Amino acid sequence: MLGAILVDVGDAPPLSTFLFWIILLATVELLPMSLAQGSAEVTMGFPLHLALALLFPPWVGMVISGIAAMDVREFRRELPLHQIAFNRSQTMISVGLPSTVF
C-alpha cells in the first residue's frame, strides 16, 4: 500500500523549481550553526524539509532532499560512502513518508 502511495506521481514541477529548492536546501545544510561552546552543530534544514513535505508530492520532496542533503564532512572525506548513502536515504524517507500523510 505504501508503494502505491509513493508511486502516485502527480505533476512534476518545472526544472527551475527543482533547482531553486535544491540550491536553497544545500546552502542551508552546508552552513551549520554551533550550539553552546561548540559541542554540537545543527542546521536549519528542518523547516525546509517540512515545506517540501507539505508542498510537493512524496517523490518530488524525496528527490530534492536526496540531492540537496549535504554535509561538510562529505567534502572533507571524513565519512565513508555507506554512511553518506544511509544519511541521504534517511533524509529522503523522513520527507517522503510525512508527505504521504499530508
Image: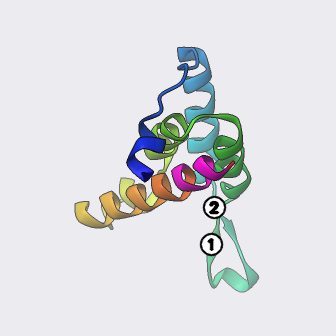
**Residue 50 location (% of width, % of height):** 69, 51
Amino acid type at mark 2: Pro
* Mark linked to residue 41: 1
Disc 2 on helix, strand or loop? loop
Image point 47% across, 56% down: which residue?
A: 93
Q: Does residue 41 belong to the magenta stretch?
A: no
In magenta, the rendered stretch is 96-101
Q: Does residue 98 belong to the magenta stretch?
A: yes
**Residue 29 location (% of width, % of height):** 59, 52
**Residue 14 location (% of width, % of height):** 57, 14
Judging depth in this view, the residue of 102 and 4 nearest the camera is 4
Q: Are marks 1 and 2 in contact (CB under 8 Å)?
A: yes
Image point 24% across, 60% down: which residue?
A: 81
Disc 1 on helix, strand or loop? strand
Q: Which residue in the protein does label 2 denote?
A: 32
Q: Is residue 52 left or right of residue 22?
A: right
Label 2 CA crowd tier, 10 Å (few <14, some 14–19, many 20+): some
Judging depth in this view, the residue of 86 and 79 nearest the camera is 86
